[in-house]
Image (cartoon, rainbow, N blue to C red):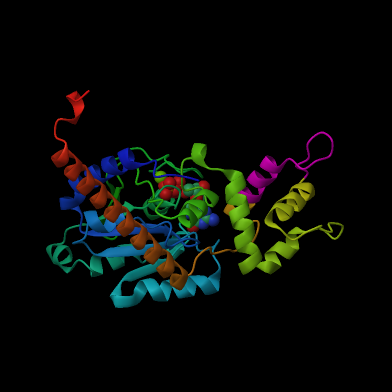
């Protein structure tokens, strides 16, 4: 299971974003439309709480349309700005400069550019979005986290200047389901992704939510002895030729292929979370944090009382 391995990076991103903050009029938070909750980062709200935020549900071409509608409604509540987008396709984002200036009347009246910070965790499509808006390659893209290096602001037609996130805003792995979804969709460092765990998690999710996609995976000849997640990955592995010497399925390779097929949309359009489910996870996270804080408080109270009872404990024997 993944742990909270990112505090150093978080502090760095936090510091760099704070330094940039005074220049910024509007924040564009890019989310992966397949995991709008898991791909958001609570840090963003802490750092730039006073700015208007536009949320982009990117990679909407890979997401389940009916679930995207639910997310759009949920995220648009209280007049928040939400845009479904395919960053590789400029026509889905052409209205972005206009939207940015409409929520920044002060700059617009002064005839100045609106400054927007594009932010989001790795691999959600920030660089692709910047390139599409700029209509040229100004940011390096790649289907793995952390290819973005520090760069200059980019001027866009329509009175908009874009700033890319300085540093890397690693996601918050506050819940094991979040870690699994981020692993599956390639938003965390490749070296810490456990493909077998991610494939088993996704297989279970798909069997419960997208049974027809699972059905398509299985060949006619594949009579599974059981309908477990392990058997599903094995069956998929056989179909994809992930076989070791001796004719057994190479489970690790099968799991990796399974995850890759999900990432690039070969398994169909999938969305891994729904607003009401994530409300439940948010509650669990809050309860865990509360329990942790309580434990810490009890521990420090205990330490204080031990010191009081026996202040010279170190030199006693
Ligand atoms: N299918 C699809 N792929 C996208 C979209 N946006 C970005 N990508 C791909 O996702 C990968 C990561 O994009 P990138 O812009 O480097 O993400 P960043 O880490 O947030 O800057 C690249 O392979 C992009 O081509 C999209 O809307 N749809
Ligand atoms: Mg990038």
Residue 89 locus on image (x, y percent): 48, 59
What residue is drawn where x is 42% and y is 56%? Answer: 39
Where is 28 relative to 77, above or below? above
Residue 53 locus on image (x, y percent): 28, 63
Residue 151 locus on image (x, y percent): 30, 40
Position of 144 with respect to 249 (left or right) is left
Instruction: Verify whether residue 171 appears in magenta.
Output: no
Q: Using the rendered view, name the quadrant where residue 3 is placed.
A: top left
Quarter of the rendering occupied by the C terminus:
top left
Q: Using the rendered view, name the quadrant where residue 208 is placed.
A: bottom right
Where is 26 relative to 7, above or below? below
Position of 65 with respect to 251 (left or right) is left
Which contiguous range is marked in magenta? 241-260
Say which of 179 and 313 sits in front: 313
Residue 86 locus on image (x, y percent): 48, 60
Q: Using the rendered view, name the quadrant where residue 147 is placed.
A: top left
What residue is drawn where x is 41% and y is 76%? Answer: 73
Q: Residue furthest front?
A: 317
What residue is drawn where x is 18% and y is 24%? Answer: 315
Q: Residue furthest right?
A: 221
Can the viewer see residue 192?
Answer: yes
Where is 64 relative to 246, above or below? below
Instruction: Verify whether residue 245 appears in magenta.
Output: yes
Q: In the rendered picture of this protein, how many numbered marks are placed on residues?
A: 0
What residue is drawn where x is 68% and y is 68%? Answer: 211
């Amino acid at each position: 299971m993944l742990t909270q391995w990112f505090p150093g990076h978080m502090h760095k991103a936090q510091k760099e974003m704070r330094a940039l903050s005074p220049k910024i009029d509007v924040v564009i938070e890019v989310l992966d439309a397949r995991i709008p909750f898991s791909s958001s980062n609570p840090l963003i709200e802490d750092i730039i709480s006073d700015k208007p935020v536009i949320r982009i549900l990117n990679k909407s071409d890979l997401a389940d349309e009916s679930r995207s509608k639910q997310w759009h409604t949920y995220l648009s509540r209280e007049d928040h700005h939400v845009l479904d987008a395919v960053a590789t396709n400029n026509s889905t984002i052409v209205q972005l400069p206009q939207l940015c200036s409409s929520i920044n009347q002060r700059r617009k009246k002064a005839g100045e550019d609106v400054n927007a910070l594009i932010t989001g965790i790795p691999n959600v499509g920030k660089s692709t979005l910047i390139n599409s808006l700029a209509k040229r390659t100004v940011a390096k893209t790649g289907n793995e986290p952390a290819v973005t290096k520090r760069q200059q602001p980019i001027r866009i037609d329509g009175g908009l200047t874009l700033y890319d996130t300085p540093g890397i805003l690693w996601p918050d792995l506050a819940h094991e389901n979040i870690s699994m979804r981020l692993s599956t969709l390639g938003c965390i460092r490749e070296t810490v992704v456990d493909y077998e765990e991610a494939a088993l998690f996704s297989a279970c999710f798909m069997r419960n939510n997208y049974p027809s996609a699972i059905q398509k995976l299985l060949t006619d000849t594949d009579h599974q002895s059981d309908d477990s997640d392990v058997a599903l990955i094995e069956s998929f592995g056989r179909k994809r030729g992930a076989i070791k010497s001796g004719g057994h399925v190479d489970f690790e390779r099968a799991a990796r292929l399974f995850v890759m097929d999900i990432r690039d949309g070969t398994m169909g359009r999938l969305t891994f979370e729904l607003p009401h489910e994530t409300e439940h996870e948010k509650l669990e996270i809050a309860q865990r944090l509360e329990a942790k804080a309580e434990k810490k408080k009890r521990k420090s109270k205990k330490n204080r009382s031990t010191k009081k009872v026996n202040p010279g404990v170190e030199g006693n024997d």
